């Protein structure tokens, strides 16, 4: 990988100072943090050692899950008098899960880099962390869409983003939340003279994209959610790009909210399918994206507009979004709305049309500099701070006490009625209410155990 063309855009995600390059190591001139590379992809997280440890942990958990699933299929195959179609399905699952685990072991081998000093206290002090709901395979289907069967969606996505870019001519382009990197790759092919940097925090997506965009073919199984036929239960797929991307296309592993780039560096910023899923308000994000862009730079927001989580104030409407962007140092945004195919695998019955937006705006002035993103509050970081008695904590405390009491009563002899009587005696809740609460809790526990023991 040639780094001369893009090292000038790098800034330490930890302290903001300049990042220098020596061989395959990236070093911060300020805090002296050492950032490794994974198969040529810079790993630029605020605390790379701890982040790498977390991804390695999730990798091992994923491999164990696949081994368990193949084992469950193998055990099911021991049943007598299975219909031939059932035996075919179970064999397909067992074989594919074993092969898939081997594919992932090969793809994610770069995670086994030389040990880095992983200081969890420092990590907490930086208040950065991987989202607990994001695993290595959370957006796994994107790889197959990007590099195997998603031509229509890829073409429509490129067309819409190009329309949002308009007559603006990118020279330094950043794609944040690039996923499998097909959109970033296609944009780069549209402006091959430009420097294009694609960043995402998921190692599986970035490592696969690195191989594909170098011109390699990547073998990864696809597992459709609702297969069209028994032949679609698990498919061996070959992921391949039309051609190698070239020396001015670069992939980076990083957190979008602690983006490892210097201020006012890029003239084009694309955030595909990202803004409405980040755990930060649009008001703050708009300031971050303004900070990354040079004067006259263009921000293109592409994808869904579906703010559903977080605080009510932050679940903004489309009209609010346009006002927020304009109030954050951007020109009056231009809006395009369209329907495109979304994740429509030819092997899956669940493909659909998605209503998407393209919001594009030009930076006309500097917004107020955003604070460094902090994922955790002070009372979680500093062990001497009092833990607040929030309403959620109070509710969880009562719920936990009741559930712990129910679990303690399970001894193989007591019935639900017996347990309800004890709960009433302990003044936890009236007997009639306790019967329903105990039954609901035990149903959930039973269903969870059933889901874990079967595919």
Image (cartoon, grey):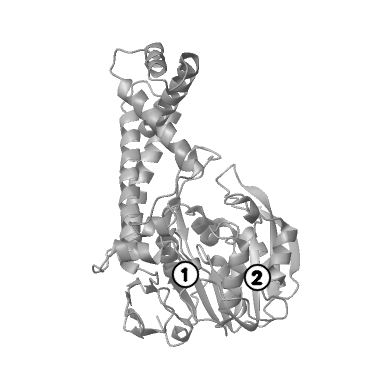
As drawn, 75 above or below 421: below
**Sequence-earlier tag: 1 or 2:** 1
Q: Position of residue 277 (x, y in %)?
A: 56, 56
Q: Is residue 368 visible?
A: yes
- Residue 439 quadrant: top left
Q: Residue at coordinates 37% horizontally, 37% vertically from top-left?
A: 91
Who is closer to the viewer here, 225 or 429?
A: 429
Q: Which residue is mark 1?
A: 258
Between 200 and 429, the one nearer to me in the picture = 429
Q: On screen, 254 above or below 170?
A: above
- Residue under the image location 50 percent in, 63 percent down: 180
Q: Secondary structure at mark 2?
A: strand
Dot 1: element? helix
Q: Quadrant of residue 124?
A: bottom left
> What residue sits right under mark 2 in the picture?
300
Q: Is residue 197 left or right of residue 100?
A: right
């Amino acid at each position: 990988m040639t780094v001369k063309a893009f090292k000038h855009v790098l800034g330490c995600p930890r302290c903001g100072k300049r990042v220098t390059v020596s061989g395959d190591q990236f070093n911060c001139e300020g805090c002296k943090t050492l950032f490794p590379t994974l198969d040529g992809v810079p790993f630029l997280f605020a605390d790379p050692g701890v982040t790498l440890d977390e991804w390695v942990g999730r990798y091992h958990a994923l491999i164990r899950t696949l081994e368990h699933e193949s084992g469950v299929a193998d055990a099911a195959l021991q049943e007598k008098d299975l219909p031939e179609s059932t035996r075919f399905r179970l064999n397909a699952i067992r074989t594919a899960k074993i092969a898939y685990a081997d594919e992932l072991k090969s793809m994610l081998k770069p995670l086994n880099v030389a040990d880095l000093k992983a200081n969890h206290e420092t990590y907490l002090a930086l208040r950065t962390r991987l989202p607990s709901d994001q695993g290595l395979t959370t957006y796994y289907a994107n790889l197959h869409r990007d590099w195997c069967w998603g031509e229509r969606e890829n073409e429509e996505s490129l067309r819409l983003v190009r329309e949002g870019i308009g007559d603006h001519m990118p020279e330094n382009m950043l794609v944040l939340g690039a996923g499998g990197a097909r959109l970033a790759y296609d944009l780069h092919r549209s402006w091959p003279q430009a420097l294009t940097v694609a960043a995402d925090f998921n190692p599986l997506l970035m490592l696969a994209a690195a191989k594909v965009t170098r011109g390699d073919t990547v073998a990864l199984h696809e597992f459709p959610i609702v297969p069209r036929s028994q032949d679609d239960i698990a498919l061996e797929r070959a992921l391949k790009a039309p051609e190698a991307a070239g020396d001015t296309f670069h992939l980076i592993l990083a957190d979008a909210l602690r983006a490892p780039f210097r201020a006012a560096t890029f003239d084009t910023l694309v955030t595909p399918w990202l803004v409405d899923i980040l755990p930060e308000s649009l008001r703050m994000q708009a300031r971050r994206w303004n900070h990354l862009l040079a004067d006259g730079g263009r921000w293109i927001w592409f994808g869904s507009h579906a703010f559903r989580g977080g605080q009510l104030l932050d679940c903004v409407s489309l009209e609010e979004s346009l006002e927020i962007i304009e109030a954050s140092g951007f020109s009056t945004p231009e809006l395009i709305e369209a329907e495109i195919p979304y994740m429509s695998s030819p092997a899956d019955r669940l493909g659909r049309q998605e209503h998407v937006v393209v919001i594009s705006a030009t930076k006309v002035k500097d917004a107020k500099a955003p604070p460094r993103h902090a994922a955790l509050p002070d009372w979680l970081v500093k062990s001497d701070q009092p833990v607040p008695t929030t309403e959620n904590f109070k509710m969880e405390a009562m719920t936990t006490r009741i559930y712990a009491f129910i679990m303690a009563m399970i001894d193989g002899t007591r019935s639900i009625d017996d347990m309800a009587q004890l709960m009433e005696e302990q003044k936890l809740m009236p007997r009639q209410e306790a019967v329903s609460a105990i039954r609901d809790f035990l149903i959930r526990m039973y269903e969870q155990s059933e889901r874990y023991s079967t595919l």
